[in-house]
Every structure is written in structure tokens, then in C-alpha cells.
Image (cartoon, grey):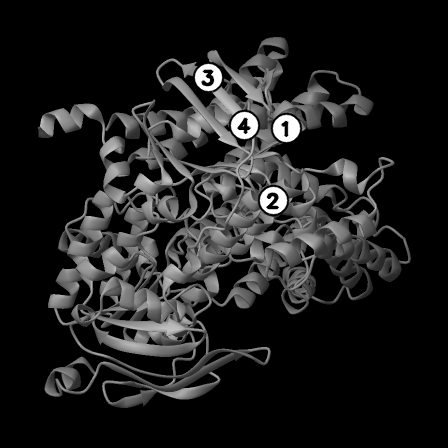
Amino acid sequence: MVETASAMPDVPLMAARGITKSFASIEVLRDVDLDLRRGEIHALLGENGAGKSTFAKILAGVHRPTRGTLTLNGAQVEVLNPIVAQRLGITLIHQEPICFPDLTVAENLVLGQKGGSPLARVPWAEMTRNARQLMDLLGVKIDVSKTMRGLSIADQQMVEIARALASDSRLIIMDEPTAPLTPKEVETLFAIARRLRDEGRTIVFISHRLEEVRILCNRVTIFRDGNKVATEDIQSFTDADIIRQMIGRPLREYMKKHGTTIGEVALKVEGLTLPGVFFDISLEVRKGEIVGLGGLVGAGRTDVARAIFGVSPAASGKISINGKPVQISDPSQAIALGLAFVPEDRAAAGIFRTLPVEENITAAVPGKIAPSGVIRRSLERVLAEDSVRKLRIRLASFRQPIGELSGGNQQKTILARWLLTEPRVLILDEPTRGIDIGVKAEFYDMIGELAASGRAILLISSELPELLALCDRVLVMSEGRITANIPRERATQESIMNAAVPRSTREAAA
Amino acid sequence: MNALGSVFLRREAGIAVMIVLFCLAVGMIRPRFLTLDELRIILLLTPLILIGAMGQMLVILSRHVDLSIGSTQGFAAMATAMMFKFHPEIPWYLGFGVAIGVGIGLGFVNGALITLFRLPAIIVTLGTLNLYRGLTFIISDAKQIDRQFVPAALKGMSTTSPIFDIPWIIFMALGTALMTHWFANHSRIGRQVFALGSNPAAAPLRGIRVNAVTLMVFMISGALAGLSGIMYASRWGFVNPSNTGFGFEFQVIAAVVIGGVSINGGVGSVLGVTLGVLLLGCVSAALPLLGIPGAAQNAIYGAVILIALLIDRSVRQRGIAALALRRVAA
């Protein structure tokens, strides 16, 4: 089949026509036509739920299309399941690769290859030798006789790529491979992806990171609401074009500040210090005010928030709420004083994955749902319904485990939980990280509304446009100190970045 | 040998050390414990458990569990013994076919319920544990099959053989262990058992026929429980509807877990399980010798198993910690 391919260079490697997919009568993919050429890296972009992952899974045989045809090298094919896909030379690499952690790397490479009776002997020596050759070919140092369990995610992805090569895959689909990787690992991955492309293989690259798509990919296809909206060379699109295509309207429209009257000081912090982490932090947030806390990752912003909330209290310094000095050494005290803290890592610090959405919503207010000590489901449901409506949380049922919701809706659920505590001061740590652009916009609206209702908001964010669009003032931290206090009118990307870069670096540059 | 391999070997060496220390300790109190006669007694205690443990090991490797093997042993032993009683004209060695065949059938029922209805193995086999025991009472009319009905040749297999007079059943058990080792580590399907237990969700995506593999491990477990049933008749010379195989699953699962098979599937070796069986055999042989009253033996037996698991757990954690340190250093 590969020989036919080289004989017909103008025929696309894979041609999808009219691909439609429905789950339980809901169409998630509608009439998608797409050609994938030999020797290209093709990006699939779109919000979560736009259909890009479903399309990739159809190519790889994880899902069967409801309608439509796939043509590989000019011949129509039925990709019945992942095993058939593998035999046709199509490999899907998941973000966190699917592997058998207790088996060796070498075994993981060959497991699933066809041929041989069930009782056929496993050729250990040959298998290990071949696996070593593949790793050498990829130029990665992985001990193939070790089990997969000890490997980093980056190495596990390399093993998956090696597996694709072992079965001589011509089409390799990477589903958000870079999300869990360090920048250096991303570089290695990209170098290998380019090499595979230069060998004439086709790579489909799914990512949320536009800058990565721009440096790696040749062409880009954008999905929105189950439709393919565009396929173009990457050069013919600006980032703004891509975002507009993905969300259907320009982002700017979402980012507008609600008119709010700013009241008295709600949270005041003076001289907060935790040696080695942050020093002499003084700030105030007024009712109705959104104060941004910008800076580079590692500047100590989250540590300050954790200190205010009593998770890991500061060594010295004063905190007052509504003008009254307070001592906070424990989060429960902070909650009682009207503070709420939505942490950055919701998976580790926020959600109870297997519990229903409604129980996640009411988790911080047991007193409200169990006035007599016994939980009353009707009260719980009333609170949950109210939150879901206000925050526009999309869910199938109140009893659905929260782990089944999308990242954005999980984040909204956590926000809903804290809003039920009726906080006077809300600390949000990177509230929109890892969620879709569309849901982000809803979050911006909500944060604005919360401020308008008189709450004081401290917003930690690494996204400059977010700080610029939402905040009345932006504080910038660098190396554990506040280095700037910039009012909205004077805040620009440059003024924030200047204050965020560590002084030592700035001096070195000057 | 790579780092991880040495951790596994250390684990098996750990069990071996425990066996030696235990035997020396008992030997200091009762020197008779360290004699060839006593070794023979220990070895005679182990073959049934070892054979049952080979099947159970495969089941646990695939992240399931088979609680019904004691009842399967009882039913297969009873069916075979009744054949001997009511059809003495049938050659005695065909009893092996009957016992294994019955075991396969009962294992198939377990596997079919688990795969067809997607039920957890622990629940299904808890049910069949009672079902098969009840059926044993029904077919036997709750009556024991006595010594005179069990063929002498069969009983002879537990007393002697041409090789150093070591009873045949010990060789049968070792042969089963060797075959299981080959099957688990060197056959394609055996590796699929490990893969299934290591990540059940990934298995179908890699072309593993999950239902077929699951059905197979339960049929093997049943077959070996059936084999242990006829060996029970050989070893003890009778089959009793309430005693035969009662508590067998406990001994077998204990041996498998002490032998280092992860209850989460995917990790384990025949060598480790064999050593685990040997340790249990030593404990069983030592208790009466130490003059521990029968009433207390069960409690002590259970306590020894827990202690062995605790020692093993701490040894393993130190091994993993050392491995992690080495990786950080490198």
C-alpha cells in the first residue's frame, strides 16, 4: 500500500468525505470533508466539543462514523477499530499514553501486533533488540527492558511514537501531546515530528496552543460546533483570524468591564512576609474592585494567596478584613471571615471527582443543606439548581459525577461552591487556565458581575490580556516582592512585563 | 540485570529469607523440625495449595479473584469419588479427566457470568462458592465417600514414586508450576493476562480479546481446582462434602499474595508464589509440632500471614525508595 502511495503523489494519504457522527441522536460532527497530504503536519484546532477529537478518533478507529467515507491512498477503507487502524498504518497517540505500566517498554511496543497463535512463544531477545533499534532511531535514551511505570509522560509518548514506527504507520495523530510536557520535552517532540514528516509521514497535531501550531504545522483545520469551518496554510491566518474562526466572533467583544462603583477597603494586607518566599507584601482590595496580581510563574503570587487564606500562613505581617484586624492560621477561619479561594489546580485541590455535581456545589456549606445535621436533598437541589442557572454550568444531570464535565464546567462548579459561602473577598488563582476560549469569556462576564455585586476580587493571572481586560488595578510581583501597582488606565502589556521580569535579569540585560 | 529486575528478585529473596529464619527459629525450639521426615511432611502439605495457587495467580494477575476454588475442589472431588464408588469398573486414572473436566465446567460458569453480565469477579465467585458447595451436598446426599471406594493406585500417588520415594503429587505440583511459568512469561496469551491486569481499559485498544482472556483464566483456575480435588482424594483417601476444599481459597489467596502477586493485577511470578506456598507449608507443619492447641492454630496461622505481608511490604517500599533515589541521583 505504501508503494502505491509513492506512485501517486498527488492523491492525498487520507481523504475524509461527509464524515458525520452522532452520539445518542446528538450530532457532534457534521459532514466533514478533509484531505491529509503526505509529508505534512496538519493541526486540528477548535474548542473542546468542537469535534476535532471526535474526528481524530474516527480516523483511528476508536469511533465509527455515522455517515461518510474514509479513503486511504485512493482506496476506500473501513476503520472498524484501533487494531484495524494500526494495520492500515494509522496510530493515535493520546495525551497521557495508554500503556501497560507493569510490562516492559519492549513488550508495550509489540503488544497487539497480529500474527501467531495464542500459545506462540514470545521472542524476548529479538523483541528487546528491535525495541533498542527503534529507540536509537528516534534518538531517545529509554531502557526498553524496564517497565513503563517508571517513565515520564514524555518518554511514554516517545514509546507510543516508536510503536507507530514499529508498525510503519503513515498517519500519526497526536492528541494534545504537549500539555503535560516541559518546554525541553516539547522541543524534542517537535524535532521528531519534523523528522517523521520529512520521511513522508503525515502527522495530525491537536493542540490548544496557537504558538505551537504556528511553529510546527504546515496546514491548519478549524472546527466549530461539529463543523469544519476552514482548512488553510498556517501562514494565511493570523492568530486573530484563527480565534475568530474558532469562537465565531472576535474575542474582544467579551472582554469588557462592567461599570462598578468601588467602595470601602474589604481586604487589607500589610507587611506580609514569609522568609525565602515573599517579603513585605502590602495590598488592599476594595468592595467592587478587581485587583490583578500579575507576574511570572514562581514569583510568589500563589504563596501570598495561600498565606492570606491560612493554608500556609505568613511568618509576620497584618491582615484586616473590613477594617478589623484578624488572625488567620487555618482555612476554616478564613471561610468564616468571608474569604474564598479558588485554587489553580482544580484536579488536585478542588473537585471530588466521583461525587455528583450537586454535592460538589454544596460541599463548602454543610450548614445550609443540613440545618438539623441531616442532609436534606431538596435543599441541596435548590442550591445546586440556582448555581447551575446563574453560572450557566452545562451538565446532563445533577447526580452526574463532576469528573464527567468539561474542564470549564468543573471550574464553574468550584466557583459556584465558593459563591455559596457568600464571600466578601474572592481570591481566584488562574481561574481560566486550561479552559476553552468560549467558556473563558463567560468567566470574564461572571467575574465582572461578582465585582458589580460588591465583592472584592483578587485575581491571579499569567495571561496579560486577561489582567488588562478585567482589572481595575494590576499589582505585579517579582521574586517575592510587589514591584508595581498600575492603575487600569496606565496598564499595558509592556508596563506589566517590565515589572515582572526579575531585577537581576533586567540589570544583566542593561 | 536491570534495577527493576533486581527489586523483583530481592522480593523473592525476601520470602526465601523469611522461610529460612522461620525454620531456624522453630528448629531451635524443636530440633525435630529440621529433619528429612519433617521436610517430607511440609512437602506433602503443599502440592494442593501450589496447584490451586497457580490458577489463582493467573486470575489475580488479570485483576480478578476466584473465591470459589475451595468449593470447586470439593465438587470435583465428590463427583470423581462418586464415579469411583458407583462405577468401579472405570479405570482410576480417568478420574483425573473427570475432576479436571468438572473444574473447567465450573470455572467456565464463573467466567461466563463475569464476562457476559459484566459482574465483579469477587461477587460472582462469592455466589458460586456457596452454589458449588451446596451442589456438592446435593449430589452426595451429604454423605462422605469413604476410603474403601478410593482406588488404591490413586492413594499410592501420595505416598511414593520411583524417584527417592518422593510422592507423585509433589512432582505433579512442580510440573504444574513449571508449565504455568512458561505459560505466563513465554506465551503470547500469558503476556496478555499480565497486560489485561496492568491496564484493563487499554487492553481492548491493543487487540486483546478481554472476554476470551478472562474466560480462559477462570477456566484454568477451575481446571486446577478440579485437579487439586482428585489429589485431595489421593492424599486423604476420602471425600467429605463439608470438609473437602473448605477454606482452600483462603490458603491459596494467602500464598499468592505473600508470594508477591499484586492484588491490582499485572505483577507477580511463579517463583514468588511457590515460595509463598512453601512458607505457608512450614507454618502449618510447625504449629502442631510446637504444641499449639488446635483451637489457637487458625488465629496464629492468620497472624503469621499478616506478619509476612507486613515484612514484605516494608522490604518492597524500601526497594522502591532506593530505586527512586537512584533515579534522582542519575
* Mark 2 and mark 3: Cα distance apart in space: 26 Å
Which residue extends farthest left?
A510
Disc 1: which residue: B305
Q: Residues within 10 Å of mark 3 (few under 14, many from 20)?
A: some
Residue B105 occupies which quadrant of the picture?
Answer: bottom right
Whether pointer 1 and pointer 4 mark residues with C-beta atoms closer than 8 Å, the reply is no
Give me the chain letter of mark 1.
Answer: B
Query: In this rendering, is residue B309 above or below A63?
Result: above
Please, what is the three-letter code of the amino acid marked with disc 1?
A: Ile
Please, what is the three-letter code of the amino acid marked with disc 4?
A: Val
Q: In front: mark 4 or mark 3?
A: 4
Per the image, label 2 sits on a secondary structure element best described as: loop
Disc 3: which residue: A270
Give the numbered dot on residue A453: 2
Could you tell me if residue A384 is visible in this image?
yes
In the image, A65: left or right of B112?
A: left
Q: Residue at x 52, y 32 (%)?
A: A286
